[in-house]
Image (cartoon, grey):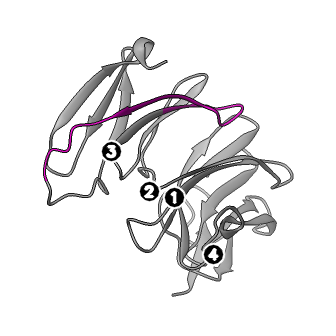
Amino acid sequence: GLGTLVCFDAGVFTPKWTLPLAGGSFGNFCCDEDRCYFGTRDGSFSAVDLASGKLAWEFDCADVFVDREHVWPSGVIDNGDSVVVTCMHQMLNDPGAMICVDKLSGVKRWSLVNSHSFSSTNGVTTDSIVTVALDYRLMRIDRASGNVLFVGTLPKSDTRSNGEFNAVALDGGFAFIVDAEKHVWRFDLSKLK
């Protein structure tokens, strides 16, 4: 369906601006001082100017896939002067991607396509992104280049879950992975190389 992005100033109940969207927003978004970055279910990953409510740029996430149908951008990561978005297909077992886009221009810097979707929650260190894909692959990805620094496989804990609800959190030099069945794995980040 369609959606609308609405901006309010703090303590004010009247919208500062509204922006009609070609698809409902799916997943999280992130904002910096100037812009808000978000994905919509029409496959677009966009930046909107917070002062004016005008689109600064729009990137078609389907451009990195062979099958361009039903591509949904979901998780957004602030990457300094760029943003990284995870994208999935409507079908969970279809390929997924991480795409790094320049904040100012909306131009793709790098993309990484996997045989299955990535988790929509990822851990971020100063130099890498830690994620889990629906095929139970644990990955550490270089934030600047998109190169995969480490790949390992999580044990499949339950056949009822496809890994679609894996979540990643980082704390004290460790990566914690939680699945839908509430199993928790802990990995030493210094060994994920």
Give the distance between the C-alpha atoms of the residues marked 1 and 4, in whole angstroms. Answer: 11 Å
Circle 4 packing at 10 Å, graded few (<14), some (14-19), many (20+), is: few
Q: Amino acid at mark 1?
A: Gly
| Residue 58 horizontal/vertical position (percent) | 76, 67
Q: Which residue is at 71% across, 33% downward?
A: 145
| Residue 115 horizontal/vertical position (percent) | 48, 55
Image disc number at residue 136 = 3
Q: Amino acid at mark 2?
A: His
* Marks 1 & 4, CB-CB < 8 Å contact: no
Q: Earlier in the sequence, mark 3 or mark 4?
A: 4
Q: Earlier in the sequence, mark 2 or mark 1?
A: 1
Q: Amino acid at mark 4?
A: Arg
Give the distance between the C-alpha atoms of the residues marked 4 and 2, in whole angstroms. Answer: 15 Å
Q: Residue furthest right?
A: 105
Q: Which residues are magenta?
A: 140-158
* Marks 3 & 4, CB-CB < 8 Å contact: no
Height in image: 21 above or below 122?
below
